[in-house]
Amino acid sequence: MSKNTPEYYRKYHSGQKYKNYKRQYRQRPEVKKREKELRERPETKEHERQRSHDYYLRAKASRQEYAQRPEVKQRARENSKRRRQSPEGREYQRKYLREWNLRKRYGISAQEHREMLSRQAGLCAICLEPMAEPFTDHDEIDGRPRVRGLLCLGCNTGLGGFRDKPERLASAIAYLVGHGYRHAETPGASIRGINA
């Protein structure tokens, strides 16, 4: 056995001396070149990819198995409840989850939502009354949400009831006008431009 090989040092020398030699051995240009060639072989890359994928699958299965344990589920429920009930948790939900919801569902940021509310002066876009909580009215165009405006709960629910169809709204207006509808506060007033 040659004295200039890692096998010799591993057999006849132990501990730090072998580690030092191994580190120096791997720094040699010819060793670096050979290791690089081995790493770049297609079968080596495929083996590494498969090993990485197998490790990912094993780790995923292990995490899922761990999460299904009754004590882990109970601890997660308790932690979630404690976070929701704490002032910091409520602030997190109010701020960050609302922003996430706006981006995920409507494709707008919290800043854009605030600007829209300020353009409407805090009033509902349909009934022009102050909103306790603004609801984001939107429609779908080519599978993407497009925000139309901010509405109060009643107007937003009403539009949903009419399924966002103008002909249904026109039919409802004709129905109300045909049955002698008058505005409750100012008799004889028009319905947003349609004379009663």
Image (cartoon, rainbow, N blue to C red):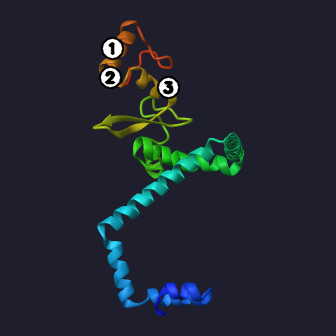
Q: Residues within 10 Å of mark 1 (few under 14, many from 20)?
A: few
Distance (Cα) linking label 1 and label 3: 19 Å
Which residue corresponds to the image point at 47% horizontal and 42% vertical from the top-left?
Answer: 121
Q: Residue furthest front?
A: 1
Spot occupied by residue 138 in the image (x, y as percentages of width and height) = 38, 35
Identify residue type, mark 1. Ser
Q: Residue at label 1? A: 171
Pointers 1 and 3 in contact (C-beta within 8 Å): no
Q: Residue at label 2? A: 165
Identify residue type, mark 3. Gly
Considering depth in this image, is 120 or 57 the residue closer to the camera? 57
Q: Residue at label 3? A: 154
Spot occupied by residue 55 in the image (x, y as percentages of width and height) = 49, 57
Q: In the image, is 153 to the left or to the right of 180?
A: right
Callout 2 secondary element: loop
Q: Earlier in the sequence, mark 1 or mark 3?
A: 3
Spot occupied by residue 88 in the image (x, y as percentages of width and height) = 68, 52
Which residue corresponds to the image point at 44% horizontal and 13% vertical from the top-left?
Answer: 182
Q: Earlier in the sequence, mark 3 or mark 2?
A: 3
Identify residue type, mark 2. Lys
